[in-house]
Image: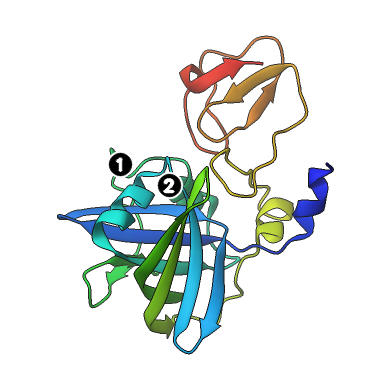
Amino acid sequence: MDTRALQALSYGLYIISTSSQGKNAGCVVNTVTQITSSPVKIMVAVNHQNYTAEMIQKSGVFEVSVLTQDASMDLIGAFGFASSKDTDKFAHADYSFDDNGIPYVTQTACAHLSCKVVDTIDAGSHVLFLAEVVDAEKLSEGVPMTYAYYHAVKKGTTPPKASGYTAPAPKTGWRCKVCGYIYEGETLPADFVCPVCKQPASSFEKI
């Protein structure tokens, strides 16, 4: 199967966030789809290994922040290549709270959706959250960032946990175990820092 055909599908870039027992969590996803219009329901795919998925299952509610083309790679990296389990991802981001007390990112976001989970589906590597949108707000006139724009203009990478991840062709070098970035070369400098997720050389493995 030629998995390049799947790259023709359209995706966006979103920050999914939730809160449970006083702890906030959030992550970047590329799969958010409107399913029905009355009532408004959406489907979100989150990797089972993401702490955010666990937190959504506990809280039953979450937020979707729709990122614009102006979103910085620092913001995307903070929410996309670290774990909320041991990192306060909101520490350096602009955000607000919805009526459920769920934080949502307002920084370079053009809209946000407040969602209540009505069903979950185990899709293997990912859990699908079917949710009713209970509130929504347009935040700016910024242009929503597509996943194609993220790759072509922002030069972003797709982490292994993403639903649209395709394993790269084998190369000689070192692979970041967090985001999948590949450093080509026989020797990885001891002071090397991943340009995508800012992880140190110790987070790389020889390939």
Q: How is the image coloured?
A: rainbow
Q: Residue at x 46, y 57 (%)?
A: 121
Give the x, y percent position of residue 93: 36, 58
Label 2 and label 1: CA atoms lie apart by 9 Å
Give the x, y percent position of residue 86: 28, 38
Judge from the rendering whether residue 50 lies leftward or rightward of residue 191; answer left or right: left
167 or 88, which is in the foreground? 167
Residue furthest out toward the left: 21
Other residues around mark 1 within 10 Å, as few (<14) / some (14–19) / many (≥20): few
Q: Earlier in the sequence, mark 2 or mark 1?
A: 2
**Could you tell me which secondary element the residue under label 2 belongs to?**
helix
- Number of marks: 2
Q: Residue at x 65, y 10 (%)?
A: 187
- Amino acid carrying label 1: it is Thr
Give the x, y percent position of residue 17: 36, 60
- Amino acid carrying label 2: it is Ala
Residue furthest out toward the top: 187
Of the 4 image quadrants, the one containing the C terminus is top right
Label pair 2/1, CB-CB below 8 angstroms: yes
Q: What number is the disc on residue 78?
A: 2
34 or 102, which is in the foreground? 34
Judge from the rendering whether residue 134 lies leftward or rightward of residue 75; answer left or right: left
Residue 10 appears in the picture as rendered? yes
Q: Residue at x 70, y 64 (%)?
A: 10
**Could you tell me which secondary element the residue under label 1 belongs to?**
loop
Residue 109 appears in the picture as rendered? no
Q: Which residue is mark 1?
A: 87
